[in-house]
Amino acid sequence: MCFITELYAPTVLISPNMTSSKGQNVELSCNVTGNPPPEVAWFRNGEKINISGIVKDCKQLKSGFYKIQRDEEAKDEVGRSRLLVCSVNHLEHTGSYTCQATNNQGNDTAATYLNILGMYRRKLISWDRYVMK
């Protein structure tokens, strides 16, 4: 008996746009299919995200990007890649997030937007030092 395995390029579906409050933890996820199983990378505003580690949750972790272990369903070609963003803040985490899946048959991407709400502090500048005397 001979089995033929169909090879195909990845497809990616990503979570919808999200809004979160400063200091909260956010999980972005993308569902990925492809054969052979694709490699997944995450990008923020076009730049590849450096993952700080693989974790289960944000307990006692500093602000940053972490990967939640990718789910592999019993020898299926469907997987889910989850990006955990701990203790979010506006400057470091607001933006467009892209999930990219690649295998030897091709690649696919999907994007979502994360908006972080929070209090903004403005630094007051004394104009005295800019006045020419």
Image (cartoon, rainbow, N blue to C red):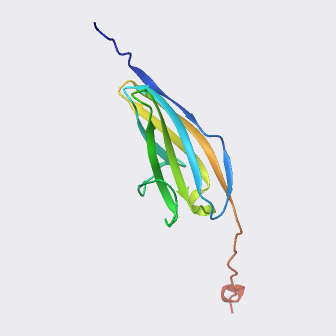
**From what the image shows, is residue 7 above or below residue 25?**
above
Q: How many marks?
A: 0
Left or right relative to 3: residue 22: right
- The residue drawn where x is 36% and y is 26% is 36
Q: Residue at x 51, y 40 (%)?
A: 99
What percent of the width, then of the height, locates residue 66?
A: 47, 54
Left-right relation of 91 to 107: right
Question: Relative to 58, does residue 5 appear above or below in the rendering?
Answer: above
- Specify the quadrant that holds the N terminus: top left
The C terminus - image quarter: bottom right
Which is nearer the eye, 119 or 21? 21
User: Is 107 situated above or below 125?
Assistant: above
- Residue 25, by quadrant, is bottom right
Residue 128 position in % (x across, y down): 70, 89
Question: Image check: 101 left or right of 111?
Answer: left
In-front residue for pair 70/100: 70
Q: Where residue 115 sits: x, y (%)? A: 66, 53
Percent coordinates x, y for residue 84 in the rendering: 52, 52
Residue for point 45% across, 34% down: 101
Q: Nearer the viewer, residue 132 or 33?
A: 33
| Residue located farthest toward the bottom when viewing the structure as drawn | 133
Q: Residue furthest top?
A: 1
| Nearer the observer, 84 or 127 | 84
Q: Residue at the spot x=61%, y=40% of the render?
A: 15
Q: Quadrant of residue 7?
A: top left
